[in-house]
Image (cartoon, grey):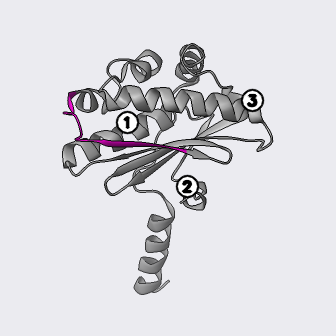
């Protein structure tokens, strides 16, 4: 094989693998997160999907139903995301800590944020709801990204990263 051909194949392989793929937590940790999450999140994880889309200034967290006709789960999602977005605006990140632990990556920095350093916007979607997090503070943007990665790892059975579904609801 010619050197240029080898270089091309290496480039194709490198671009096909995400640069910062999130490693799935152990099965034991996934089970523990589901158990603790059932005391915090009122919706059924098996009937929903968490979508974490990182953006340049933060990220978008969505919870959507697998069955768009499931009005009960949609209402439970909306109620929960409304509640936690209000808590997050006040700097209260106790619910993620209850599920993921106090040492969850990014959580300490998010808790230290001063009022209005992170814009937190709740929005209803036809099949669930979303919370958009944005900041102009690089430390907080990094914290949001770390926090998303930790959630993707811990919710691996029920979460996806950067799903194009986000773009459908803009």
The image position of residue 113, as x and y in percent, is 21, 33
Q: Residue at x 58, y 28 (%)?
A: 79
Q: Which mark is residue 147?
A: 1
Q: Which mark is residue 166?
A: 2
Name which of mark 3 and mark 2 comes first in the sequence.
3
Is 86 left or right of 82, judged from the image as shown? left
Alpha-carbon neighbours of circle 3 within 10 Å: few (<14), some, or many (≥20)?
A: few
Disc 3 and disc 2: Cα gap in Å?
22 Å
Alpha-carbon neighbours of circle 1 within 10 Å: few (<14), some, or many (≥20)?
A: many
- Disc 1 secondary structure class: helix
Q: Nearer the viewer, mark 3 or mark 2?
A: 3
Question: In the rendered view, would you say 6 is above or below 75?
Answer: below
Corner quadrant of residue 164: bottom right
Asked if the magenta segment contains residue 114, the reply would be: yes
Give the residues in magenta: 112-123
Asked if the magenta segment contains residue 22, the reply would be: no
The image position of residue 96, as x and y in percent, is 43, 23
Is 119 left or right of 152, judged from the image as shown? left
């Amino acid at each position: 094989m010619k050197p240029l051909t080898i270089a091309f194949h290496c480039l194709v392989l490198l671009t096909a693998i995400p640069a910062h793929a999130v490693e799935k937590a152990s099965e034991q940790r996934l089970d523990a997160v589901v158990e603790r999450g059932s005391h915090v999140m009122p919706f059924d994880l098996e009937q929903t999907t968490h979508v974490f889309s990182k953006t340049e200034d933060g990220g978008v967290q969505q919870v959507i139903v697998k069955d768009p006709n499931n009005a009960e789960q949609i209402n439970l999602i909306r109620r929960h995301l409304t509640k936690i977005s209000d808590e997050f605006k006040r700097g209260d990140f106790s619910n993620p800590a209850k599920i993921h632990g106090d040492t969850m990556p990014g959580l300490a920095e998010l808790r230290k944020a001063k009022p209005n350093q992170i814009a937190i916007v709740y929005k209803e979607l036809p099949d669930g709801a979303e919370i958009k997090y944005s900041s102009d503070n690089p430390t907080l943007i990094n914290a949001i990204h770390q926090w998303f990665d930790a959630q993707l790892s811990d919710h691996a059975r029920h979460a996806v990263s950067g799903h194009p579904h986000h773009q459908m609801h803009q």
